[in-house]
Image (tube, rainbow, N blue to C red):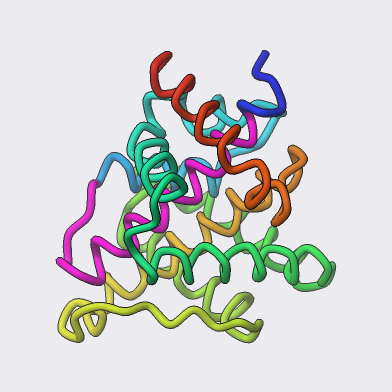
Amino acid sequence: MASPEQARAAAMAAVFQALDGVRDIADRGQHDAEATRTCLRGLLGDYSGSVTGLYGGDASLRRGLDLLISHLAQPQSMHLTRYLVAVLQLERRLRRDRARLTALAAGLERTRHQADYFGQIDHDSVIHHLGDLYSEHISPLRPRIMVQGHAHHLQDSRNAALIRALLLAAIRAAGLWQMNGGGRLRLVLGRRALIETARTLKAAA
């Protein structure tokens, strides 16, 4: 059984992994497909108390663990910091809006059935449906995340839907972070402990 510290580190790694996918798509029009599928499994899966279990194990979050360690130790990307802060704020606002949260959960349940039908969690129809859910339930909230990147990548309809799906996955992971005792103060004041726990998870992956 993972400790609360390990659960928080895994959840925050999932946030970073999703946001890393957002950056890759916006900047290069490409992404790590397996890392993306891990994020989507976390978004559409049933949480039974194990964060790493939800995402398929520590090894599935290696990319996010690497980015968590490097960014919290010495931030290199202002865009990533802005995305992270916005995701944490959006998760908090969503959590407090019970009607919106219930409607989103129902939409995710429909998307889960859709993924089961196609047998592919990153099927185009699934991605576009997740993108629509983000537009409907998250886009009206503030702050609105303005993704920076190359226009020709951002204007591609599948890229745009996948970015929204990954932002939704990041918000879900932020909810798991909060559920396991995370918060803004813990992220700031407990940064070093979080990095060390992430290193432990990475070594065990």
Q: Position of residue 25 (x, y in %)?
A: 24, 65
Q: Residue at 43%, 45% (x, y): give it.
A: 73
Quarter of the view holding residue 46: top right
Image quarter for residue 60? top left
Name the residue at 28% across, 39% down. 34
The question of residue 105 being in magenta is answered with no
Q: Nearer the viewer, residue 78 or 2?
A: 78
Is residue 26 in the magenta section? yes
Q: Residue drawn at (39%, 17%), measured in percent from left and top?
A: 203
Q: Position of residue 13 (x, y in %)?
A: 48, 41
* Stretch of the chain drawn in magenta: 7-32
Q: Is residue 18 above or below residue 48?
A: below
- Quadrant containing the C terminus is top left
Between 188 and 161, the one lying in front of the other is 188
Q: Is residue 47 left or right of residue 165?
A: right
Q: Position of residue 11 (x, y in %)?
A: 57, 40
Say above or below: 5 vs 95: above
